[in-house]
Image (cartoon, rainbow, N blue to C red):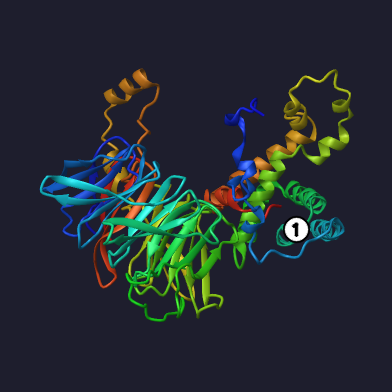
Amino acid sequence: MSQINYRTINVDQLDPESSVNFPMETLLPATLPQPETSSDAANVATQVRQLLRSGDTEGALRHVLDTAPLGGDDRAKEVHLATVIEVLQGIRQAEMTRVLEGVTGGEGGSERADCLMKYIYKGMSSPGPSSDAQSPRKTVSPQATGFSQIQARNLGEGGGGQQMSVLLNWHEKLVELTGTGSIVRVMTDRRTV
Amino acid sequence: MAAPQVHHLFHAPIADHSFSTDRQTLAVARDNNVELYQASGSKFTLSDELKGHDKTVTSVDIAPNSGRIVTCSQDRNAYVWEKTATGWKPTLVLLRINRAATFVRWSPSEQKFAVGSGARVIAVCYFEEENDWWISKHLKKPIRSTITTLAWHPNSVLLAAGSTDSHARVFSSFIKGIDQRPEPSAWGERLPFNTICGEYLNDTAGWIQGVCFSPSGNALAFSGHDSSVTVVYPSAPEQPPRAMLNISTRLLPLNSLIWNGENEIIAAGHDCEPFRFRGDESGWQLAGSLEKQSGAGAAGAREESALNMFRQMDLKGQTAMDTKLKSTHQNTVNTIRVFEEADGQVSSFSTSGVDGRVVIWST
């Protein structure tokens, strides 16, 4: 016992009141919607695709942001992220400002703007589903280089790079409308998408 | 609206500042000391230093009537400074905390003060005659993280606290023998020590950086790191509030706020300039900046001669210096305080920030 170096003991782990044991769920508001499953998210995706096909891009974006599975499980969130990205990629650059003004205006507009900002950041942090599916090259890459991020992001080639540039375009337009406050709220908000 | 009075005291961050009631003395927290400045003409000159803390001083407050100064610091101590013939004499306060003290404010009655800390407690301190020292009682439940800010209700019993657990709370700090029994209000009727009269969380969470009661004490405003200001109107004890209005702004987060009457809030923070919010129970909105839009920026942009332009290009590779902000403050504003008021109507207020400036604004 005399061998223990008391200086290296992580005392926070032994203290039940320590800040490392902070209950994160206390940061979730009481108004959090009911948990959704991935099949709910898939239903939304079908509805949104119909709206997109009928040419109602603004309606599609509005619907997909209003139905964000804030209380859902990881799988539901992933499905919904794919839907949002699909909508964002389906809107032409010339239309972006008009659509954004419509979606972020009116009742609940600022919540939709904050929600869209969350999806933009989440989209930029994830490798992008399209590049995953269509790049077998990635799995047969010569040998592990240790730079896992380079492969995961797949910048500049394939779907990942294109998705990134779409998201960056949206980000620029959205910040013009909602200011830096919206970016700050993505960082503080615990209702993740 | 007169131009703001700028006092650039030094090139170091000001954690907190406080003016005496006669507005002749200014106390400023700088590193491990508190510096006292005396007004002489239109300027403030250094007159005294309060040395005693051995870590960064986080907060300072001058009691309006008694003139006592209370300071607190990251060294986990608070001192009450009293002016004697031989200078300022500190009295140690028994805080009993094991983390930094982050914020201190005198109650309006000046019988007590509250110290927020990283130890997840608020120490409510009062003077004990028989032992001749300041002792404290702890408000503990249900604080889950560091207290960042505090504000007193006009009745000196209710205390609002903002915390890094994203909650703004209203506590009773009633101490028998010190406090008068408070009038029943929408916050509560019977108020023993550590009664929780309200606990509020924004949808977007975010650390709470500033809290303030309205002049009547019947509304509470708080600003958080989610760039929003929230105003709460309580209905009755133990009931959900009558209205809780969240104004999410397009600005950077606001660090500190004050009320001007019951229908206006002035707040400042990382955008380096004060902003005005207006509204009532039915709704609040951002009403714009108090900075004169054409003011500092236009005056700061000097007439550029062609010679000067080419010289700049040669020396620095750019035609104009763009390192100066257009706002009066050149960095984050930490504290905003009422400077002059009558019946809750603020005619001027002061701000201090990371840029070492104290600025007095008229509303």
Amino acid beneath label 1: Pro
Residue B323: x, y in percent?
Answer: 37, 33
Q: Chain of mark 1?
A: A
Camera sees residue B290:
no
Residue ID at (21%, 49%): B26
Mark 1 is surrounded, within 10 Å at the Cα level, by few (under 14), some (14 to 19) or many (20 or more) other residues, namely: many
Camera sees residue A77:
yes
Q: To which quarter of the image does residue B216 belong? A: bottom left
Secondary structure under tag 1 reads loop
Outermost residue on the front side: it is A2
For the residue pair B162 and B40, the one nearer the viewer reads as: B162
Label 1 sits on residue: A69
Residue ID at (74%, 61%): A67
Residue A72 vs residue B1: left or right?
right
Residue ID at (36%, 54%): B104
Residue B5: x, y in percent?
Answer: 22, 50
